[in-house]
Amino acid sequence: MTENIVETKNLLSGYGKLKVLFDVNFKARKNDITVVVGPNGAGKTTLLNSIIGLATIHDGSVIFDGQDVTKVPPHKKAKLGIAYLMQMGNVASTLTVEENLRVAGYLMPRSEVNDRIQEILEMFPRLKEFVHRKAGTLSGGERRMLAIGMAMMRKPKVLMLDEMSTDLAPKIVKQVMNKIVELRDQYDLSVILVEQNAKKALEIGDYAYLLVSGTVRYEGNPQELLTHPKFAKLYLGISE
Amino acid sequence: MIEIFTRAIAYSGGIALAAAGITLIYMATGTFNFAHASKVAWGFYIVYAMMSLLGGSPYYYVIPAALFSAFLGFVTYFFVNRYLLKRKADMVTLMMSTLGVDLIFFAFLNVFADYLTEVYKLSARYFVMELKDPIIMRMGATEIRAVPVVSFISVILVTIGIYLFMTRTNFGIAMRTTIENPELAQVLGINPEKIYLAAWLLGGGMAGLSGAFLSLTISGYPSVGMTILVTLFAGSIVGGLDSIIASILGGFLIGMVEQLGTYSLSVALGGWICAYRPIIPMVAMVITLLFFPRGLATIDWKKVLGKLGVKI
C-alpha cells in the first residue's frame, strides 16, 4: 500500500502538439485535500485532465494507487475509482437530475443504483425537490451539488474538483467547501482541489501546490502559501 | 386517390426510418453519413434476393435486411469512422469518408446484382416487388397492399422503441450523455466507442429496415439509395439534427410532400414533372428551414399555436 493515491512523475503534457505542463512532479496523499492554485493559464486544469486522461501526455507518468495508469483511458480510470468534476459541463443539462445520477451510476450493478440515488439525495436534500427537473434549469450552486452527488455515486477513492467556486456567491462557495471537507471526513476520500479562489481553497487544504506557467513553483503547507511574502500577492491576489 | 395516399404512407415510412438513422449517427458521432444510401439499397437487395431464392413473403426478410445493413454500419464504424474520430477529424473529413465507403458498398452491390443475374438468372439490375406484397383490402377497384400499414406501424413502434430506449435504459441515458458531452460521459465511466458503435449499428439497422419497406413501394436498382439520398437528408434536416424523434417526423413529412406533391403537380402540369421529383423535397426543406432554421425539433409549439389563436 502506498501513501500517495495520485502521483505524476516528470509530467510533460498538453493538448495535441501544444505543451502546457513541464516536468511536473505532483503527489496527492490518501485522505488529504490537496489544493492546486495558480494564475490563469498556469496549467491547473491540464494537470487534472492529464491525470484522468483527457490531455495528451508527451512524457512522464501518472500513478494511481501504486499503479501506472498513464495510458489508461478516462472511462477505465473512472472504474478504478477516480471521479472528476470538470469546470464546465460537469452535469448533462438535457438530462433530469435523476437521469444524471443514474448515468453517474453507469458502472454500478443495476440493483444498487436506486438505493445509491436515494443515499445521494439524502446527502444533498436540496436536490430532492428537483429530481425530475432538467439539470440545465438548475442554479449554479444546485448544479455543483448535483455534480458532486454524481461523483459520489460510485463511491470513488479520489475526487478531483476543477474550479468549483466559479460564478458562485461567497455564501454558496462556503457551503461547497464545507461539503467537500464533510465528504472527505465521512467517506475517507482523497480530494484534489483546483481553485482560482485560492484563499478559500487553501483554508481547507492539507497540502498545496502553486503552478505557474506549467511548472510547480511551490509545494507544501497551504497556510504558509497563504502568507508567503512573494507568491501570495504575486500569483494568488492575496494581500494579507 | 386512396392508392396514391397509401403509397405515400408506405414511402414516407421508409424515408422516416432512414432519416432517423442519419440523425442518430450524426448526433452520436458528428458524421453526416452518405453511406446510408448503399445501406438502404442493400436492404432492397437482401429482401429481393432472399425472396427470389428462398420464396415466401417478403416480410420474412425484413429483419435479415435490417441486420445486414446494421453489419454495414459496424463495418463503416470499425474500419473508418473509429480512426477518424480518434484523430478528432473535422466534420467535412468525416462526411467525405462516408462518401468513399458508400462507393465501396455500391461497388459490392453491383457485383452482387451481377452475380444474381449471371448465376440465378434474376432480373437483379432492375426489379419491381410491389406485386409480391399481399393485398389486405379492396375498395372497389383499388387494392390496398400490406406495406403502407406495416411501414406505418413500424415507424410508430420504432419511435416508441427509441423513446423508451433513450429514457428508460441505462445505455440509452449513457448515449444521450455522450451525445451531449463526450468528455463528461468518459469521466463517468462510459466508453464512448461503445456508444458510437451502437449508433452505427442502430442507424444501419434502420437504413436496412427502410430499404426493405421501400423495396415494396418503389423499383429496385443498384443506385436506388443514391436516388433517394437527397430525400433522406432533407427529412433528417427538416426534423432537426438534434432529435431522432423529430427526424422521424421530418422524414415522414418530406416523404408525403414528395409523393403527394409529385402526384398533384403531374395532374396539374403533366407527367413531365415527374422527372423533377427530387426537387420537391429540397424545396420543402428550404421553405421549412426559412421559417424554422433548426428544424421541426426546435419549434415552440405553444407559441405557434398561440399565434394561431389555439390555447393549450
Image (tube, coloured by chain):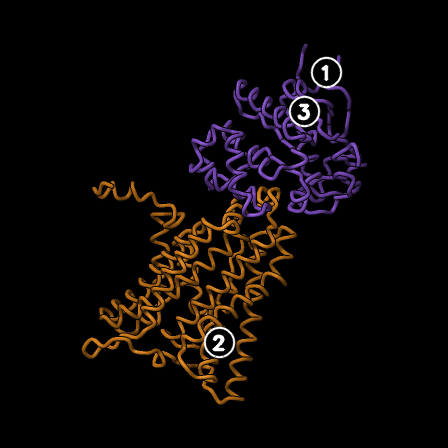
Chain colours: A purple, B orange
Picture coordinates of residue B143, whole percent (x, y): 25, 77
Residue type pointed to by label 2? Ile
What is the secondary structure assignment of the residue under circle 2? helix
**Of pointers 3 and 1, the one earlier in the residue sequence:** 3
What is the secondary structure assignment of the residue under circle 3? loop
The residue sitting at 71% across, 40% down in the picture is A18
Q: Which mark is residue A39?
A: 3
Q: Nearer the viewer, mark 3 or mark 1?
A: 1
Seen in the image, is B42 located left or right of residue B291? right
Q: Chain of mark 1?
A: A
Front one among B170 and B239: B170
Return the residue found at the far top.
A240
Q: Which mark is residue A223?
A: 1
Residue type pointed to by label 1? Gln
Q: CA distance from mark 3 to mark 1?
A: 18 Å
Front one among A150 and B224: A150
What is the secondary structure assignment of the residue under circle 1? helix
Residue B104 sits in quarter: bottom right
Picture coordinates of residue A101, whole percent (x, y): 52, 39
